[in-house]
């Protein structure tokens, strides 16, 4: 696997040219890229050859004619899905089982896995062209302030990633891959496993003399802000980048106050392993879709388009820059809403906002509660988690700043949670303390509230 700087510059220049041409050129470019991908998929992927058997010529295909694809169907036909024959699922899985091979290419591609929060994890195969696209297009879409920020930050120090380290996830793997393929682009970087204790993360961070950026999940960022407020975390990073979960305005504000060293507001990326760089956030806080290389369709439950301004039931992604593992009208499961008006930043690309998934809602009988109603903060606890163990049984797990205070802290949190249930008319709910440490998702995300497993889809 080789990362070509020349091809990256090609994506960059092409990206600029497309943007300068306005909507007409963007849409023409997208259609051309779509038809090329469809043709490639029909020619080299037995799965798509069968799926598109009744379709007219690829050169006349329109997006809406193409059937929706879903993870279980594609994964069950993995060997026929790819446009290369040299990477059967068994071989990919063997690679993924060996954590030493994280971020190490296999032949001409890199492979990662999804966290599997919505079922079986998917195996994601990325060719070098996809990485070249990611870099080239991101740079093409930068505005003046982002260029300035990038130049300033390069000189500051180390880039830190804090994400799940218990698997071949893109969060950590991409860093390793790029420092191997293009060390000068990647810059000095360090990885910290999100799975360890908060105390451990704080200690690791405090030991790094100069931190330029920290890339992590919003849930981890919440904890970092809290540790900074408590005076245990002493770092002065220049920038935070987040992804993988919903970033709230409250958290942005809290982070701004806790870290006066920041040179920029938190930069939030909407990303998934299937499509790492679908969009870029502008100075107005909107996500602008890289429409020349990615198509996102906001649809309802019947897979019909919803009007701009309406929250979608799910979203279909088409990744035009990955022709080894075609994602065409692939159901991602996220909910988003396209803006109805052009963005004040002047970008010609459509913009959208992402809404969190509903998966974390708590259901007790007829009552549905948002995880946000629970006050799961305590100054003597570093991390508190509320876990629903059966419909009417809950347990509180925590990681304490000072073990000596355990009894009191548990009691206060348990009482506060019980009050919240009572306020919502739920009298017969049991809440007890648990000695089990808080649990993270497979990719190292921390959810404050864990609903009963299997109670949501
Ligand atoms: Zn904008």
Image (spheres, rainbow, N blue to C red):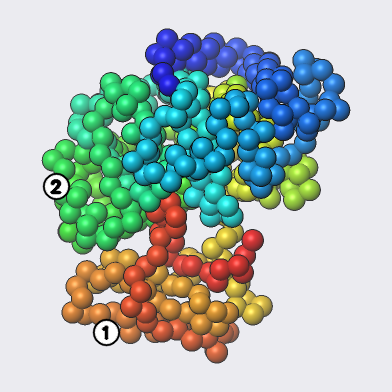
Figure check: 356 above or below 274: below
Residue 414 location, quadrant: bottom left
Figure check: 268 above or below 148: below
Q: Residues within 10 Å of mark 1 (few under 14, many from 20)?
A: few
Give left or right: position of 441 versus 42.
left
Residue at 55% x, 79% y is 390
Q: CA distance from mark 1 to mark 2?
A: 32 Å
Q: Earlier in the sequence, mark 1 or mark 2?
A: 2
On the image, the x and y values in percent for residue 231 come to 17, 59
Residue 407 numbered tag: 1
On the image, the x and y values in percent for residue 182 come to 33, 21
Residue 266 showing in the rendered view: no
Q: Which residue is mark 2?
A: 207
On the image, the x and y values in percent for residue 154 come to 25, 26
Give left or right: position of 225 versus 346.
left
Figure check: 402 above or below 119: below
Residue 301 showing in the rendered view: yes
Helix, strand or loop at label 2? It is loop
């Amino acid at each position: 696997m080789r990362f070509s700087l020349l091809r990256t510059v090609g994506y960059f220049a092409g990206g600029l040219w497309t943007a300068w041409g306005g909507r007409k050129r963007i849409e023409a470019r997208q259609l051309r890229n779509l038809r090329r991908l469809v043709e490639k998929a029909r020619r080299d992927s037995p799965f798509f050859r069968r799926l598109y058997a009744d379709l007219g010529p690829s050169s006349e295909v329109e997006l809406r004619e193409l059937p929706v694809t879903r993870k279980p169907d594609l994964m069950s036909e993995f060997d026929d899905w790819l446009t290369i024959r040299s990477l059967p699922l068994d071989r990919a899985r063997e690679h993924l089982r060996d954590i030493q091979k994280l971020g190490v290419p296999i032949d001409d591609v890199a492979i990662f896995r999804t966290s599997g929060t919505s079922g079986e994890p998917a195996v994601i195969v990325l060719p070098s062209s996809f990485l070249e696209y990611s870099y080239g297009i991101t740079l093409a879409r930068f505005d003046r302030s982002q260029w300035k920020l990038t130049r300033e930050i390069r000189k500051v120090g180390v880039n830190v990633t804090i994400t799940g380290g218990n698997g071949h996830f893109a969060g950590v793997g991409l860093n390793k891959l790029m420092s191997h393929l293009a060390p000068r682009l990647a810059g000095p970087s360090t990885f910290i496993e999100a799975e360890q204790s908060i105390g451990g993360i704080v200690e690791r961070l405090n030991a790094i003399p100069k931190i330029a950026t920290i890339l992590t999940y919003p849930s981890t960022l919440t904890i970092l802000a809290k540790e900074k407020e408590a005076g245990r975390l002493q770092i002065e990073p220049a920038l935070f980048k987040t992804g993988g979960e919903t970033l709230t305005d409250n958290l942005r504000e809290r982070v701004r106050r806790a870290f006066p060293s920041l040179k920029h507001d938190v930069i939030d990326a909407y990303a998934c392993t299937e499509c790492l760089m679908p969009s870029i956030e502008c100075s107005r806080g909107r996500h602008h879709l890289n429409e020349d290389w990615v198509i996102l369709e906001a649809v309802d439950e019947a897979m019909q388009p919803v009007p701009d301004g309406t929250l979608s039931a799910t979203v279909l992604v088409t990744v035009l820059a990955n022709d080894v593992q075609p994602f065409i009208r692939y159901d991602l499961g996220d909910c988003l809403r396209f803006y109805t008006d052009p963005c004040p930043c002047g970008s010609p690309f459509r913009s959208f906002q992402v809404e969190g998934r509903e998966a974390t809602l708590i259901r007790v009988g007829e009552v549905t509660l948002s995880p946000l109603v629970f006050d799961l903060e305590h100054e003597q606890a570093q991390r508190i988690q509320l876990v629903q163990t059966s419909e009417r049984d809950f347990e509180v797990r925590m990681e304490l700043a000072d073990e000596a205070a355990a009894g009191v802290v548990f009691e206060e949190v348990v009482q506060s949670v019980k009050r919240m249930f009572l306020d919502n008319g739920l009298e017969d709910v049991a809440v007890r303390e648990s000695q089990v440490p808080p649990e993270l998702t497979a990719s190292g995300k921390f959810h404050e509230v864990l609903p009963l497993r299997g109670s949501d889809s």
